[in-house]
Image (cartoon, grey):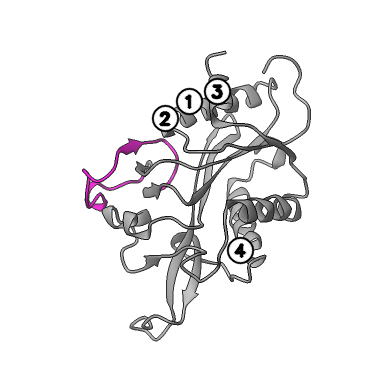
Amino acid sequence: MEGKACKVIEWIVSEGLTDYRQAEDWMETRANAIAAGRASECIWLVEHPPLYTAGTSAKERDLVDPGRFPVHRTRRGGQYTYHGPGQRVVYVLLNVGERGRDVRRFVQQLEAWVIATLDQFNVRGEIREGRVGVWVERRNKPAMPDGRAAEDKIAAIGIRLRKWTSFHGLSINVEPDLTHFEGIVPCGISDHGVTSLVDLGLPVGFAEIDVALHRSFSDVFGEAPARSAISAKHQLDDITS
């Protein structure tokens, strides 16, 4: 990571399951290097083993089954969330300082990125005031008490900034075991469920979602990340190299 950073956003895809704590260490190292001008920005796509993470706003009562999976305390924004096989986790390491220092706008861009990605599979993702993440209507489920269509969460968003460099990011449910969400109150919201692309009847895998993410990133951010496929082991070895 030494030397002058080029103005290229690196697009990294790690295969297999990536240890969460090692991923956090790698992100912190890379974020510091980006802030210091010693590394390029990057988007890192990973998959984790089953685990729960607690953000800075997490409430203990929302950890319903603390013995079910490992619980990782983290300094990203948000509450409890689940990561596991079948979920595409997208870590976003970008220089927000060079993008106007507007955190609200940056989060809106992340939401728009998810929505544009889902749109490529004819899934209408929406945001809701007071509810973090991206939601889809479920008209095949009983309506809400006020008559509105039921809604399930399909994507979560939670970021952290250090010296105006973002890390952590978002996750999209492609084909996770949805029962694994039952050990927490996801993002503190108990009156709505969770869903996935496969749960919606779409036979989508990581290969398809990754292509859609790459394409829609350019549409939302106006920049095209440079592709690179690097194994998780190679990437995590960089922490100690």
Q: Is residue 193 above or below residue 216?
A: below
From the image, tell me which residue sits under label 4. 118
Q: Which callout, 3 or 2, points at the residue further toward the start of the chain?
A: 2
Q: Label 1 is placed on what type of residue?
A: Asp
Q: How far apart are labels 3 and 1 at the CA level? A: 6 Å
- Circles 3 and 2, Cβ within 8 Å, touching? The answer is no
Residue placed most toward the observer, 222 or 140: 140
Asked whether residue 171 is in view, the answer is: yes
Q: How far apart are labels 4 and 2 at the CA level? A: 29 Å
Quadrant position of the N terminus in the picture: top right
Residue placed most toward the observer, 198 or 137: 198
- Circles 3 and 1, Cβ within 8 Å, touching? The answer is yes
- Name which residue lies at 47% across and 52% down: 86
Q: Position of residue 197 (x, y in %)?
A: 52, 64
Q: How far apart are labels 1 and 4 at the CA level? A: 30 Å
- Bounds of the magenta span? 57-79
Q: Is 138 part of what is drawn in magenta?
A: no
Q: Is residue 2 above or below residue 231?
A: above
The 10 Å Cα crowd at callout 3, few under 14, some 14 to 19, many 20 or more, is some
Q: Label 2 is placed on what type of residue?
A: Arg
Q: How far apart are labels 3 and 2 at the CA level? A: 12 Å
Q: Label 3 is placed on what type of residue?
A: Thr
- Circles 1 and 2, Cβ within 8 Å, touching? The answer is yes
From the image, tell me which residue sits under label 1. 25
Q: Label 4 is placed on what type of residue?
A: Leu
Q: Quadrant of residue 193?
A: bottom left
* Circle number at residue 21: 2
Q: Position of residue 46 (x, y in %)?
A: 53, 40
Q: How far apart are labels 1 and 2 at the CA level? A: 6 Å
Q: Quadrant of residue 223?
A: top right
From the image, tell me which residue sits under label 3. 29
Which of discs 3 and 4 lies nearer the camera? The answer is 4
